[in-house]
Image: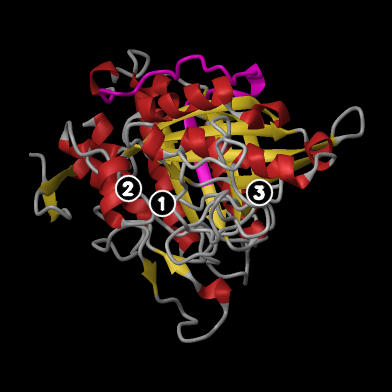
Amino acid sequence: MTMTQKYPNKTGAVHSISRRNLLIGAAAGSASSLSPAGAEVASGKAGTADESARAYVFYGNGPQAGIMTPPQRHIFYMTFDLTTNDRDALRALLARWSAAIAQMMKGETIGQVEPARAEAVAPDTGEALNLGPSGLTVTIGLGPDVFTDRFGLAEKRPALFRPLMQLPSDALRPELTGGDLSLQACADDPQVTYHAIRDLVRIAKNTGTAATRWTVMGFGRASAGKGQSTPRNLFGFKDGTRNIVDPSDFDEFVWIKEGPEWQIGGTYQVARKVQMQIENWDTNRVSHQNAVFGRHKLSGAPLGGRHEFDIPDFTRRGRDGELVIPKTAHISLAAHENNGGIRILRRSYNYTDGLNDVGLLDAGLLFISYQNDPAHFEALQMKLGAADALNEYITHIGSALFFVPPAAIEGTYVGAAVFD
C-alpha cells in the first residue's frame, strides 16, 4: 500500500508526496518545512548585529531560495555533466544534495568533521566551522538533457525548455558552455560559498553520478535586490538600477504560472560568462563611457536626468539635435519600454580569473538571469548582441540554460515531482 502525505502549498492546493519520496529525502533532517523557501529566519545569534547569523529557509512550498533572496556579496557557481544514465542515481543525488544544502543553510555541518575512527573519512570538510550561515542559499537547476529519454523523462520536459538559440554576441567556448545540473551558492562570506560547493561536489563524485563542467567564483554582487543600494560592475558603472524587486513583477516575469502543478513557482535560469576588455575600457574618456551605458558614471542617473532612479527619456534630443541617450546605449536597447514590456531578473556577479596568457586582466561579469520564458532573454540579447555599443568591450564566452524547480517540502527533495 502506498502512503501519501499532503501539504498545503501557497495557493491552497496540495502537494502529494509518496512514501518512497519521503524515505529518499529522510536525510533532510528537522528543518522548518512550511515556510516559503528563501524566507529569512532567526538563528542562534538572533538579536545581534553579526551578519554571519543571517539564515534563510531551504524547505518550503514556493520557489527555491537564492532567486528572490536579496543578492548576497559572493557567489560560487558550478555546472555538472551527469556521468550516469541511471534515473534512480540521479534521484538519489538530488535527495542527498537537498539534505546537505538544508543543513549548510542553517550553518550546520553535513556530518562529522573529525570522526572518532582515525581511519574514517570526514563527510564535512570543515572550513566553514564557526562562520555561521552567513546568508547562504544554494539553488539547484536541471539542464535540458535531464528531460530526455536518457532518464525516461522526455514527457516531463517543461513546455518552454529548449537550448538557447545562437545569439549575435556568442563567442562561446565549449568548456564554458552547457551542463546537466547547476548549483548557485551565494553568501556574504566567500568561504561559506566555497565550502558549500566543495562538499556538494564531493557528494556527486563519491556517488559517481556527476562531474564538474565549468565554474565561476564571483565577488561583489552586480545587481540590486529590494532595499539594496545599486552595486557597480567592473567597468565602474551602477548595475541593475531597474532590476525586478516587487513581488508582483516576480509573479509576472519570473515565476512559471502555467503547466503541471509541480512546475508552478519554478523558473528558468540563464548563466552567461561575459569577459570584459578592461584595459581598453580604461583608456576611454568618461564621456564616451557614459554614452555607451546611457548613464552618468558617478551618479548612475540616465543621461538627461539628475538622479539614478529617474525614468530614462529615450526621445529627448540635445541642442545638436542628437538623442541624449544614443540608440546604441546599453540601457536604451535593454529597457522594457523598448522591448514590448519584457523584463528579466538580473542576479549577476563580478568575477576575476587573474591574468590571461598575455598579462592582461582576465575578468568580467557572471551574468545570471531568471525569467519564466527563456525567449525573453533571447529577445533582449538579440538586440544587445546586434547593436549594443558595449559589445566593443565585452565577449560572451560561456552560456547555459537550466530549469529551476520549486523548493522542496521537508521530507522530499528539489525536483522530486519530476520523477513521479
Q: Are marks 3 and 1 in contact (CB under 8 Å)?
A: no
Which residue matches tag 3?
Answer: 233
Density class for disc 1 (Cα within 10 Å; few <14, some 14-19, many ≥20) is many
Q: Position of residue 390 (x, y in %)?
A: 65, 32
In the rendered image, the quadrant that contains the N terminus is top left
Q: Secondary structure at mark 3?
A: loop
Question: Label 2 vs label 3: CA separation?
Answer: 40 Å
Residue shown at the point (71%, 42%) measured from the top left? 289
Q: Are marks 2 and 3 in contact (CB under 8 Å)?
A: no
Residue 256 visible? The answer is: yes
**What mark, if any, has residue 25 been given in the picture?**
2
Residue shown at the point (56%, 17%) measured from the top left? 168
Which residue matches tag 1?
Answer: 99
Foreground residue, 55 or 275? 275
Q: Range of the magenta residues?
A: 158-184
Q: Are marks 2 and 1 in contact (CB under 8 Å)?
A: yes
